[in-house]
Image (cartoon, rainbow, N blue to C red):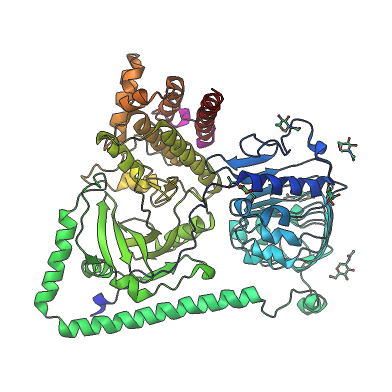
């Protein structure tokens, strides 16, 4: 009876909008120049002579001072202009963040120690994708506007050493925040109830905050709170003598409690999701009842048989060319698996933002046909096609992962906070003791593995594409490693079949953080479709160095055009050939025919060989790897530009 009451998937949305087409550099340039003109009061010489920042050069291609771009899409990601004298200028983020090519990719702004003044920080709310905002050491005054709450991707915020006053908006609503520095201002009112468990840095000393320090605030030392005469509670020695006194005096300071438009939208979004879930469950129960009445034993047996064929007839994930094409119901797939397992807890968590809730309904997902894409050592991947609205999802099912439900949930939420445009985000997940399900947006353009396999079938895979995929993956991993260092979440199972391609053929790293190395090494089965890493050390550094090894194998695959089930074999083959100094033998012949620069191929090979070093300590960090690979890629880009311009002159 109960066995049928398992509802796997729901979920709901697409917040992930694939990268926009290449950006218009003219628009970007004009916006940046306007931003600087405001900051510097029309004196761009403030940045010095060779900074770029003029009408005859381009921000990304010409490497403007303080501007960091995604070199593939030529879109601005970071602006760092610390320590320039902007004392006669003004800050206006609308100049940059109202401009689409920038606003969509712009994540990092730092204007520290610039003596900037003014009351208008309101415009910052336009830069919705910001993850890092550093405005310390200026002379901003007035209060922090409510528009800061729109920065819901923010992770690090530094507004220290300014002249800010008034009550903070409820920044605890920005759930991903891990750093808040506001020391040396005149801020007052209560400290928002931050979830300090994720914080890595916090300082509100030398202000005029009052009332009780929120729970867990004592994770930070006294020096994070000193010189706020009205503040009390741990870690300060001052006890909160009379609560009523505090709350009375602060009441008028508190942020307005009436709902704003955003809040209403947000809550009604939650309400709708809740409603959809309940409706879905009811519908599903109804459907199952009906089914049960109608279907006789035979039809059930038939269903089971069908499932079994799907399981047995399909190839492993390393051989995706022969896809199982039978239609099956993903929900029944889950149900049949739980029949034998008798799952205990069933919780389904939707990782989504209400505004992206796009009208897809639960029952549509349940009805949708599913196709088994591949099966690896730890789980299977299904493609689920929904009709209404039309969308295709990839559902990963992992069996026997020895992670507790709450830890898994925490991990998924953590990963959801850290968004990178080149990491495929999960849209929803489900967790029971025996299995975990993850729902992703399906990527139509296949995987890196398929591109590599295509080489054998005479499909071209150009050197420049290989380089830009390598650089994209390295950059993305470097970002993820940095963000997830404290949480010790590495990718854990990086391989070419996990590197998907979005519609601009940019790499999207899939299945991030689904396995930790320790877990991989404890579950051993006969399949060899996953890499078995030579080292399974428990220490944190080693966890991340496993990703470096795996990335090295991917570089080798890109260079040799060979794909092998076992990464170690490829690595040791390459190393043995190099020992005999037959470097050229190693490379994919089509690259040599294409006329790819041998020098850069050798440089990339050297990076790869460093990555696959047996000793984790000897492997470079992913930051170093990313730097080396992007340098090679940039050199290659420049040489293409150069040859293109000479040929047009001729
Ligand atoms: C970029 O935008 C400007 C102004 O909108 C337009 O004049 C120019 O043609 C665009 N360039 C490209 C390559 O789209
Ligand atoms: C900068 O100069 C432009 C025209 O050259 C003018 O329109 C603008 O108001 C000036 N901005 C400032 C901050 O002085
Ligand atoms: C522009 O800035 C430079 C460097 O800070 C300064 O020397 C120069 O006097 C400024 N020019 C004007 C017109 O303010
Ligand atoms: C614009 O910046 C580029 C790059 O720094 C520089 O080569 C060029 O001379 C500058 N042009 C002008 C007009 O200042
Ligand atoms: C500090 O805040 C309290 C109210 O919380 C206010 O009465 C007092 O004037 C403030 N002091 C300063 C120096 O701003
Ligand atoms: C907080 O800021 C104050 C003032 O700048 C500084 O003295 C103190 O060391 C800081 N404390 C922490 C924990 O960062």
- Residue 30 magenta: no
Which residue is at the far top?
A: 580
Depth order, front residue of 378/227: 378
Answer with left or right where residue 510 lies relative to residue 413: left
Which residue is at the far left?
A: 298
Q: Is residue 469 visible?
A: yes
- Secondary structure of the magenta portion, mostly? helix
Answer with left or right where residue 563 lies relative to residue 185: left
Where 386 falls versus 317 (above or below)? below
- Provide residue 521's location: percent of width, then percent of height: 32, 44
Residue depicted at 82% across the width and 38% down the height: 46
- Provide residue 541's location: percent of width, then percent of height: 49, 39
Magenta highlight range: 615-625
- Provide residue 53's location: percent of width, then percent of height: 73, 38
Residue depicted at 82% across the width and 45% down the height: 40
Q: Is residue 220 visible?
A: no
Residue depicted at 63% across the width and 51% down the height: 102
In which quadrant of the rendered image does the N terminus lie? bottom left
- Provide residue 147's location: percent of width, then percent of height: 71, 65
Answer with left or right where residue 326 lies relative to residue 16: left
Counting labels gives 0
Among the 4 quarters of the image, the one containing residue 426: bottom left
Among the 4 quarters of the image, the one containing residue 293: bottom left
Where 112 falls versus 273 (above or below)? above
Depth order, front residue of 177/74: 74
Among the 4 quarters of the image, the one containing residue 239: bottom right
- Residue 624 magenta: yes
């Amino acid at each position: 009876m109960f066995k049928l009451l398992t509802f796997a998937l729901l979920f709901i949305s697409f917040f992930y909008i694939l990268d926009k087409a290449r950006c218009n550099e003219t628009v970007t340039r004009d916006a940046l120049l306007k931003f600087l003109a405001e900051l510097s009061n029309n004196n761009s010489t403030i940045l010095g002579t060779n900074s770029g920042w003029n009408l005859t050069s381009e921000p990304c291609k010409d490497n403007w001072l303080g501007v960091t771009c995604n070199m593939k899409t030529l879109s601005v990601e970071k602006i760092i202009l610390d320590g320039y004298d902007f004392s006669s200028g003004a800050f206006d983020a609308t100049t940059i963040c109202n401009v689409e090519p920038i606003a969509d990719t712009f994540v990092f702004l730092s204007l520290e120690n610039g003596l900037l003044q003014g009351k208008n920080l309101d415009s910052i709310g336009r830069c919705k994708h910001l993850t890092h905002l550093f405005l310390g050491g200026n002379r901003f005054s007035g209060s922090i506007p409510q528009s800061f709450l729109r920065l819901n991707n923010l992770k690090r915020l530094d507004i220290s050493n300014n002249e800010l006053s008034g009550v903070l908006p409820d920044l605890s609503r920005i759930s991903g925040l891990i750093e808040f520095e506001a020391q040396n201002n005149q801020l007052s009112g209560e400290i928002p109830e931050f979830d300090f468990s994720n914080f890595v840095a916090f300082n509100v000393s030398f202000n005029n905050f009052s009332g009780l320090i929120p729970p867990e605030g004592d994770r930070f030392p006294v020096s994070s709170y000193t010189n706020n005469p009205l503040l009390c509670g741990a870690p300060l020695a001052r006890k909160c003598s009379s609560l009523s006194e505090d709350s009375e005096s602060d009441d008028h300071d508190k942020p307005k409690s009436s709902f704003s438009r955003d809040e209403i939208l947000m809550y009604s979004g939650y309400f709708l999701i809740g409603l959809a879930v309940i409706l879905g469950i009811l519908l599903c129960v109804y459907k199952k009842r009906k089914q049960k009445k109608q279907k006789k034993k035979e039809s059930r047996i038939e269903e089971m048989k069908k499932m079994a064929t799907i399981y047995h007839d399909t190839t492993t994930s390393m051989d995706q060319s022969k896809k199982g094409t039978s239609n099956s119901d993903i929900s029944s797939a889950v149900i049949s698996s739980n029949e034998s397992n008798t799952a205990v807890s069933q919780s389904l968590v939707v990782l989504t933002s209400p505004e992206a809730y796009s009208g897809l309904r639960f029952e549509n997902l349940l009805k949708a046909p599913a196709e088994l894409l591949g099966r690896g050592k730890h789980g299977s991947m299904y493609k689920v096609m929904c009709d209404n609205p039309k969308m295709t999802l990839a559902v990963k099912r992992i069996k026997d992962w020895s992670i507790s439900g709450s830890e898994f949930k925490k991990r998924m939420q953590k990963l959801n906070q850290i968004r990178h445009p080149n990491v495929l985000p999960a849209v929803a997940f489900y967790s029971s003791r025996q299995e975990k399900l993850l729902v992703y947006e399906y990527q139509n353009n296949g995987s890196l593995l398929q591109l590599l396999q295509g080489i054998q079938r005479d499909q071209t895979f150009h050197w420049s594409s290989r380089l830009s995929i390598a650089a994209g993956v390295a950059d993305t991993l470097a970002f993820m490693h940095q963000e997830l260092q404290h949480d010790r979440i590495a990718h854990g199972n990086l391989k070419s079949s996990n590197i998907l391609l979005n519609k601009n053929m940019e790499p999207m790293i899939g299945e991030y953080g689904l396995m930790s190395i320790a877990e991989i090494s404890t579950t051993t089965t006969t399949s060899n479709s996953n890499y078995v890493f030579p080292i399974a050390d428990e220490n944190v550094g080693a966890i991340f160095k496993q990703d470096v090894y795996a990335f090295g194998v991917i570089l080798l695959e890109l260079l040799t055009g060979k794909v092998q089930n076992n990464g170690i074999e490829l690595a040791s083959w390459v190393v043995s050939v190099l020992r005999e100094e037959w470097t050229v033998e190693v490379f994919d012949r089509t690259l040599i025919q294409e006329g790819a620069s041998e020098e850069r191929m050798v440089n990339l090979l050297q990076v790869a060989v460093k990555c696959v070093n047996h000793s984790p300590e000897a492997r470079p960090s992913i930051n170093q790897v990313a730097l080396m690979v992007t340098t090679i890629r940039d050199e290659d880009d420049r040489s293409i530009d150069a040859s293109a311009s000479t040929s047009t002159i001729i």
